[in-house]
Image (cartoon, rainbow, N blue to C red):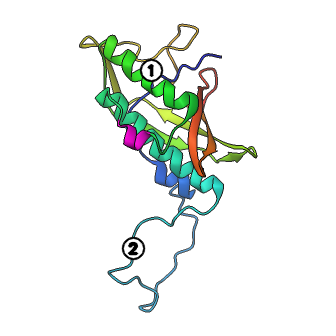
Amino acid sequence: MRKHHSALGGVALALALALTGCGGDDNEPTVQETPSQSQSPTAPTSSPTPKTDEEKAAAQLTRYLEVRDLAHRKRTIDFKTLNPVATGDEFLELQETVVGMKKADVTKTGSFVHMLGEPRNRGNSIEITDCEDRSGVTVKVKGNVRKPDYTAPDGNPLRNPVPVKYTLIKDKGTWKVSESDLLWDESC
């Protein structure tokens, strides 16, 4: 199946919840901190460093989506940020998409919301499906808003949100996005 994700773009959001597995459930018991347990003001507040291959791949996909979404909004690519997170077909596909957007005078504004599913280790690769919500993105062609924003290969409007399966491989010791597949006929 031909990849149809080149029309996708925006800003990676809501990924911290997907990566940490937090969903806002209030089923967790409340824990009272004692003064000796509270963090000092100099303690780091960022999330822990990814340790497993699956965590590292998910973190890399998050970075890639940020780079990709910015490239779609600006219609240009910063290779210093793309090289560490993408390789192979995906690396080339993003370049092709950006060039095509410029030629067709397509602009995208707003932001996408990405919700990553659980990473699936396939031995030599890791697959992660992103449930991508495009409702916050406006697509214009030559200054006119395009309706419908995105179409599926069958010509019908593309459902929203839509799942996109990403494959990451190790490249020089680092997980990188190597390909993506828009699962246009599936739902999140």
Q: Is residue 109 above or below residue 34?
A: above
* Dot 2 amino acid type: Pro
Q: Is residue 2 above or below residue 47?
A: above
* Dot 1 amino acid type: Glu
Which of labels 1 and 2 is toward the front?
1
- Residue sticking out furthest to the right: 123
Query: Which quarter of the image is occupied by the N terminus?
Result: top right
| Residue on which disc 1 sits | 96
Q: Quadrant of residue 125?
A: top right
Specify start and end residues of the magenta stretch as a single range.
78-82
- Residue sticking out furthest to the front: 172
How many numbered discs, if any?
2
Question: At which x and y percent is residue 71?
Answer: 36, 32
Q: Is residue 129 above or below residue 72?
A: below
- Residue sticking out furthest to the left: 143
Residue drawn at (46%, 27%) of the image: 94
Residue drawn at (32%, 17%) of the image: 102
| Residue on which disc 2 sits | 44
Q: Nearer the viewer, residue 47 or 36?
A: 47
